[in-house]
Image (tube, rainbow, N blue to C red):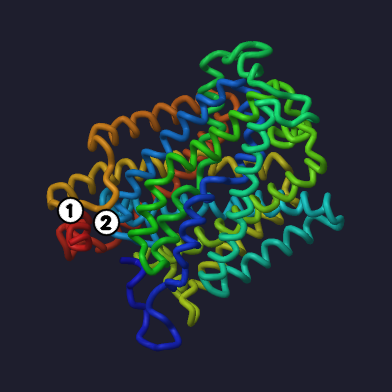
Amino acid sequence: MATTESHSSTEEAPTSLGSNLKPRHITMISIAGVIGAGLFVGSANAIEKAGPAVLISYALAGTLVVLVMRMLGEMATANPDTGSFSVYADRALGRWAGFSVGWLYWWFWVLVIPVEATAAAAILTDLVGGQQWIWALAVTLLLTITNLASVGNYGEFEFWFALIKVVAIVAFILVGVAAIFGWIPSSEVSGVSHLWQPDGFMPNGFGAVIAGMLITMFSFMGTEIVTIAAAESPNPERGITKAVNSVIWRISLFYIGSIFVVVALMPYNKLENGSYQSVLEAIGIPGSKIIMDIVILTAVASCLNSALYTASRMMFSLGTRHDAPQVVRSLTPKGVPWVAVLMSMVVGFLAVVGNYVLPDKIFAWLLATSGAIALFVYLTIAASQWRLGRVLRAEGHRPPVRMWLFPYLTGVVMLFILAVLILMVFDNDQRQAIIFSAISAMIIVSAGFIVQRRSRYHSDDEGPQTRYREEVS
């Protein structure tokens, strides 16, 4: 495994990543990892596009995530690895695939850093004052320092960030349900009539539901982080199993449950202040704006914290497979890949600077290069499990998590993802993202084929699937 490959024999330079993530860290990361800033910030756009039928959009996107996590969980419980799906793609499809999806995933999270740092800076400037670039720098440096200290620090920060997000969503749902039943006298809204008013449940047709699904799809990105983080815990198999088995109720409660409250209580075209804040204001909750600013700030900080962690671990894994400069394998005495953390932070912060310096259109193009990477990752996970799942079953292995109706449901998922990618080409709001993402993917995949061709990486064994058989035995 990438997490146990030796780098040196000295005590000062440990041979593997740390294993200081506690069970409560993994549990909370798995519970709240699905609650991204996109739920609070981007849901209003999806609701405006699809109307109350956005519930179908979230159900479709959520079902895809559940199935992808099931496939990833099967591979990860059979052989936990901090490189997660990048390592499994290497073993199932070839070195080019592991190289490509690893670097694409790293690029995605590196570009998340400027987006989240800028969002956090805007909220802090509004709440406290000061210049945005100073806040962006301060937030980025603070979370970089915590990531450098130890993986336990990342886990501790993420635990509390996640707890705040969970409490906020549960409280919102409880208050919303109370308003629906008319139990809050001061509320201006009650009942569920807005599920079909003012223009019906599906006011803009089924095409708008699909368009809403394309928006919501990317708010789920981050669910897979638990399979990366669990590799740095004492019992990764147990952590991953719990996370995968609970993903259905997490998506149902946090996403579909909270969005149901929004569309039941508010007209879909009257969410001027964002979906959650608009509902709280209509119910009459005092300080709704400040409450939501704090919740969104927490979600943004959590996402930035995870972006630094995830990008660095993926780069470290690429280094262990000689798909990145070997310097990224350098570890602190506590097992933190400090070079990978700093390189990810530097590239991410350069993008933060670019957000303020570059013209808006240029920076938008930069962000568009990662717009469809979530779907590329999901497709790779499905293709990898299609092949490695056969290996596991042929050898009689029964990991704690197994994909349902294999291989038929895996094939359906791959066809569905391909259909979504094609639909993005015909959606005016998504066309730039799919085109620029396809260009970035073609460049990296081409590099992957070149690396594979020039390397003798697989020359001394019978192939990646043979190595997979050996490692799960």
Q: How far across and how far down the image is residue 209, in percent?
A: 53, 21
Q: How far across and how far down the image is residue 404, in percent?
A: 27, 38
Q: Is residue 297 above or below residue 18?
A: above
Q: Nearest the camera: 431 or 240?
A: 240
Q: Residue flagged by tag 1: what amino acid is it?
A: His
Dot 2: few (<14), some (14–19), or many (≥20) neighbours within 10 Å? many
Snapshot quadrant of residue 240:
bottom left
Is 340 left or right of 320, judged from the image as shown?
right
As measured in the structure, the alpha-carbon distance from the residue carrying label 2 to the one carrying label 1 is: 8 Å
Write the residue at 40% across / 26% down: 419
Snapshot quadrant of residue 471:
bottom left
Snapshot quadrant of residue 284:
top right
Q: Which mark is residue 45?
A: none
Q: Is residue 47 above or below residue 250?
A: above
Q: Residue flagged by tag 2: what amino acid is it?
A: Ala
First of labels 2, 1 by sequence position: 2
* CB-based contact (under 8 Å), mark 2 and mark 1: yes
> Where is mark 2, residue-wise?
78
Q: Which mark is residue 397?
A: 1
Q: How far across and how far down the image is residue 61, in percent?
A: 47, 33
The N terminus lies in quadrant: bottom left
The C terminus lies in quadrant: bottom left
Is 279 left or right of 42, judged from the image as shown?
right
Q: How far across and how far down the image is residue 454, in percent?
A: 30, 60
Is 34 left or right of 419, judged from the image as shown?
right
Is 168 left or right of 454, judged from the image as shown?
right
Query: Which residue, as the protein is rendered here, is positioned at the far top?
Result: 199
Q: Secondary structure at mark 2?
A: helix
Dot 1: few (<14), some (14–19), or many (≥20) neighbours within 10 Å? some
Write the residue at 59% across / 28% down: 260
